[in-house]
């Protein structure tokens, strides 16, 4: 930016130099009088001539007015734009961001864009979910694509969360570095939206209970998860390989999905056998989460679906596309 500003100033300095030199040569004035005359001529302030002008001086003044004033106006325009452009860009970007945040819904809010926040954001985006990132550091915005808006601010502030669309969001992940801030974020988010699904990060065991009391649905220690996964790979390498293929983009093309049975869903009231989910879509029902959080694993064929059930299934991705097309 500094180089561009100097480039914008160079033509102005050149015109001032030519004007000053012209008056000194033609009229024989001093350096200061010549510079003063050049400046009041180019700025058209109308203070009058420094000294009476000769015919040659008048002709030079006419040329200086015709050539100089237009160039000076153009130079000042460019100079102003170089100074204002960054601020104008910030204003336009802010307006664009406000427009996106005003319309977004059924999204996930990731509070904190550190190592954990980056992974969560990337995984959600790869799964086709809408994400809003909240972080205090503006420099982190360069790491995000245009499709993922970043809101700069304190995630424990009600106004910031409301601007992030918390009332229209599906879930929130509190994963800032400070555990105390995660507690405040969780508490604030739960107060604003009692129905929001909240996951909070912790490291200190004493923080776990605080986060649950603050309203977190799930609390995660990323180090415990990493250690558990390493242990499972060592103890049960084949099972771990199959699960990795199912959860990642592996050769099995398998994926886990959830089907939320709300009031009016066609499966409510049907038994697992009568629904024919297995034969029609080739899906395996692993478990059902009942209202209140109770998990029913490996339900039998006579199980009857109820309102509020969350059905956990595993199947080929193409089969899920067919299933959700019918049970959207």
Image: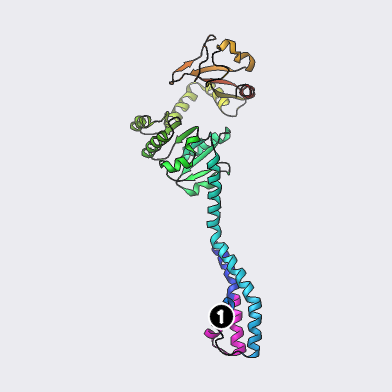
Task: Report the colour scheme.
Answer: rainbow
Label 1 crowd bin: few (<14), some (14–19), many (20+), radius 10 Å: few
With respect to residue 143, does 11 lie above or below? below
| Snapshot quadrant of residue 11 | bottom right
Q: Is residue 226 left or right of residue 35?
A: left
- Span of residues in magenta: 14-35
- Most frequent secondary structure within the magenta stretch: helix
Q: Does the magenta stretch include residue 63?
A: no
Percent x, y of residue 303: 52, 11
Residue tagged 1 = 46
Residue lying at 59% horizontally and 10% vertically, measured from the top left: 274
Secondary structure of the residue carrying tag 1 is loop
Q: Residue furthest top?
A: 302
Residue lying at 59% horizontally and 71% vertically, measured from the top left: 10
Percent x, y of residue 144: 55, 43
Q: In this view, does 242 lie to the left or right of 292?
A: right
Residue 195 vs residue 151, the one in the foreground: 195
Instruction: Assign the C terminus to one quadrant of the image.
Output: top right
Labels in figure, total: 1
Residue lying at 60% horizontally and 85% vertically, measured from the top left: 23
Q: In this view, does 49 lie to the left or right of 226?
A: right
Q: Residue furthest left?
A: 206
Percent x, y of residue 70: 64, 72
Q: Does the magenta stretch include residue 28?
A: yes
Taking the image as drawn, is residue 222 in sight? no
Residue 118 vs residue 43, the one in the foreground: 43
Instruction: Assign the N terminus to one quadrant of the image.
Output: bottom right
With respect to residue 230, does 143 lie above or below? below
Taking the image as drawn, is residue 125 in sight? yes
């Amino acid at each position: 930016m500094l180089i561009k500003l100097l480039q914008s100033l160079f033509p102005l300095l050149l015109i001032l130099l030519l004007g000053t030199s012209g008056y000194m040569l033609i009229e024989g004035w001093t350096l200061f009088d010549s510079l003063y005359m050049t400046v009041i001529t180019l700025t058209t302030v109308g203070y009058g001539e420094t000294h009476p002008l000769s015919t040659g001086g008048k002709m030079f003044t006419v040329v200086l007015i015709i050539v100089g004033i237009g160039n000076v106006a153009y130079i000042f325009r460019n100079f102003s734009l170089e100074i204002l452009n960054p601020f104008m860009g910030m204003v336009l970007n802010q307006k664009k961001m406000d427009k996106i945040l005003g319309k977004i819904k059924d999204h996930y809010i990731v509070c904190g864009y550190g190592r954990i926040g980056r992974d969560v954001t990337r995984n959600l985006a790869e799964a086709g979910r809408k994400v809003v990132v909240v972080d205090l550091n503006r420099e982190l915005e360069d790491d995000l694509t245009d499709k993922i808006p970043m809101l700069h601010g304190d995630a424990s502030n009600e106004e910031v969360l409301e601007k992030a669309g918390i009332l229209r969001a599906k879930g929130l992940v509190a994963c800032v570095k400070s555990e105390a801030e995660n507690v405040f974020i969780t508490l604030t988010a739960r107060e604003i939206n009692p129905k929001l699904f909240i996951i909070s990060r912790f490291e200190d065991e004493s923080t776990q209970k605080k986060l649950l009391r603050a309203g977190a649905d799930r609390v995660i220690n990323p180090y415990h998860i990493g250690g558990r996964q390493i242990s499972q790979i060592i103890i049960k390498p084949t099972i771990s390989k199959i699960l990795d293929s199912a959860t990642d983009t592996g050769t099995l093309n398998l994926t886990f999905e959830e089907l939320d049975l709300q009031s009016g869903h066609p499966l409510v009231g049907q038994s697992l056998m009568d629904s024919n989910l297995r034969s029609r879509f080739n899906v395996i029902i692993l478990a059902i989460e009942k209202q209140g959080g109770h998990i029913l694993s490996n339900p039998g064929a006579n199980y009857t679906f109820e309102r509020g059930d969350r059905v956990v299934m595993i199947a080929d991705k193409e089969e899920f596309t067919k299933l959700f097309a019918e049970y959207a």
